[in-house]
Amino acid sequence: MSSFKGSYDYSIDNKGRMNIPAKLRKYVSPDANDTFVITRGFEKCLFVYPQDEWNQLENSIRALSPTNPQHRFFMRVLLQQAVESQLDGQSRITIPKDLLQFASIEDEVTILGVLEHIEVWNPKEYKQYLASQENSYESVAQTVLQKKEM
Amino acid sequence: MSSFKGSYDYSIDNKGRMNIPAKLRKYVSPDANDTFVITRGFEKCLFVYPQDEWNQLENSIRALSPTNPQHRFFMRVLLQQAVESQLDGQSRITIPKDLLQFASIEDEVTILGVLEHIEVWNPKEYKQYLASQENSYESVAQTVLQKKEM
DNA sequence: CACAATTGTGGGTAACTGTGGGGAAATTTG
DNA sequence: CAAATTTCCCCACAGTTACCCACAATTGTG
């Protein structure tokens, strides 16, 4: 299982190519075949899954109940815009324009490692997102960390 | 479980490399694979976790629900500044510049062993912090120790 | 106390990383 | 079907990183 972490400021060239940070690449399993699945994320960002992680996700989606409205929503969001992309010789993936547009990404990106997937943000949007949630950090932190300390 | 203790004045060279004090290294489990995770601490300092200790923390994050917006936020914030670093031949780790900047660290550091993690401070900041908390020490000590005796 | 091993610090260099661009092949469009 | 556009593979290059070696100071040991 992957454990991506860290945040990286990278650029996207005018061909829509984005480098996968070396520190994230290190955690990609060879099972991923240098292939990634890019899709819409929650919030205004893109999710990038190594192929093997994506397959696991697909399996757990299949297990979801199709009668549960929330589950249906989850499936639609993830599956609708999913695209596969393979690393080129410089370990970059190419991101389709419509996905870039969805996340308002132009030439600069903030890349986040979030355990089993990678997120791609417009740096400005990400900063706004961080600022908008500021107060909820401590409350959630307490719940989580308390759990750990006990 | 680790039990780091003590305080050590060390230096950071111009490549951002910091030696892990031998007395702390002694308590690092072999499970850590000579690998550490560096992240922002509370207050103006850095936390350094041996990999095995960090994994415990990570596992409690994995348990969070990806469909809960608050949980998503928490994962992002917590992971965003985490970086892995492996010991080099001289048992040093390399600390990225942005983390050093966050803690206002230049070339001198105070390293603290705090049970399951290690803290890295700018010596000046640490002294200030100590001074600012001086009076609250006794009251905290009382609360904590009392609790223990019960 | 003498000697060996370990510890803390520094520097050189080869390999890797992030970024850009050119051109052939494939695809789309009028 | 020809022209325009997009996609993919290759090359280039500056900046950074990781790995190796070096060495003085400290610690541990018989």
Image (tube, coloured by chain):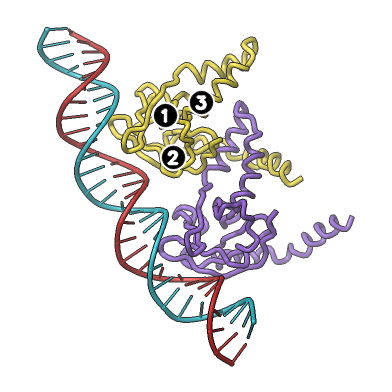
Chain colours: A yellow, B purple, C red, D cyan
Say if A141 sits above or below B89 in the image: above
Label 1 sits on a secondary structure element that is strand
Horizontal arrangement in the rendering, residue A112 relative to residue A92 (left or right): right
**Along the polypeptide, which appears first: circle 1 or circle 3?**
1
Per the rendering, the mark at residue A54 is 3
Residue linked to disc 2: A25
Q: The numbered mark 1 sits on a residue in which chain? A: A
| Residue under disc 3 on the same chain as residue under disc 2 | yes
Residue furthest right in the image: B150
Check whether the beta carbons of the residues at disc 3 and disc 2 lie within 8 A of each other.
no
Residue A107 in picture, x, y percent from top left: 33, 35
Residue B42 in picture, x, y percent from top left: 61, 52
Q: Residue at x 42, y 34 (%)?
A: A122
**Along the polypeptide, which appears first: circle 1 or circle 2?**
2
Residue type, mark 1 in image: Thr
Q: The numbered mark 3 sits on a residue in which chain? A: A
Per the rendering, the mark at residue A35 is 1
| Quadrant containing the C terminus of chain A in the rendered view | top right
Residue type, mark 2 in image: Arg
Label 2 sits on a secondary structure element that is helix
Residue A144 in picture, x, y percent from top left: 69, 40
| Quadrant containing the N terminus of chain A in the rendered view | top right
Residue B13 picture quarter? bottom left
